Structure formats: structure tokens, C-alpha cells
Amino acid sequence: MSKTMISARVDVELNEKLEALASSTQRSKAFLITEALEALVAREAWLEERISDAVKFADNTEEWISHEAMEKWVNSLDTDAPLPPPEPDVFRSKKKLSA
């Protein structure tokens, strides 16, 4: 695999932490930066694919649960009286679809 050089400005504190990590792991800063970038790019690509799949699914769905309903439910989970999971409350058509 061919390689290319990139550069980035980082805070002095981050550079010092990176140098310390490189020293303690006996790896070069370049190796650690490359590992970190590979992990970041892989994670972001995975997340982008999941979001794209979710959007496609939503585009083909007739009913959804609103953000407000989900937020109310999630916020109740840390209370003494958690709410049951919400039911769909947003519908593509004006009337609720029959089950």
C-alpha cells in the first residue's frame, strides 16, 4: 500500500500525551496516529451506513415514534416510575393505520 504524508495542528497538551503514550507503548507517534485515524474512519463509515439504512427504512415506513415521545420515555427510565415504551404517534396518512 502506498503512503502519503499529512499534517495537523494539535494542542501542546495532546502532543505531550501522544508522546507519552508512544514512549510507554514503544510505538511511534505516526503509528498511533495512523491507528487512531483508521479506527475513526471505520467507525464513522459504519455509523454513516447505519444512518443511511435507517433513513431508507423510515422512507418506506408508514408510522414512526416522535422524538418528543422517545425523549419522554428515555427520560423516565431513571425515575421511580418509568413509562412503557412509546407507541407510534406519527403517521404518513392522516388516520392511524389498522393493525
Image (cartoon, rainbow, N blue to C red):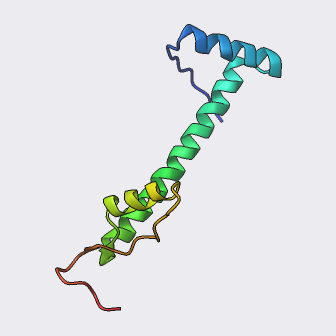
Residue 68 percent coordinates (x, y): 32, 59
Q: Which quarter of the image is occupied by the C terminus?
A: bottom left
Which of these two is toward me, 39 or 69? 69
Residue at position x 35%, y 63% in the image = 69
Residue at position x 74%, y 19% in the image = 21
Q: In which quarter of the image is residue 51?
A: bottom left
Which of these two is toward me, 64 or 5? 64
Which of these two is toward me, 4 or 12? 12
Q: In this view, does 90 lie above or below 6?
A: below
Tell me: 84 left or right of 17. Answer: left
Residue 34 percent coordinates (x, y): 64, 29
Q: In this view, does 45 lie above or below 8?
A: below
Q: Quadrant of residue 36?
A: top right
The furthest residue to the left: 94
Q: In which quarter of the image is residue 18?
A: top right
Residue at position x 56%, y 45% in the image = 43
The furthest residue to the bottom: 99
Does residue 26 appear in this view? no
Q: In this view, does 6 lie above or below 54?
A: above
Q: In this view, does 6 lie above or below 56?
A: above
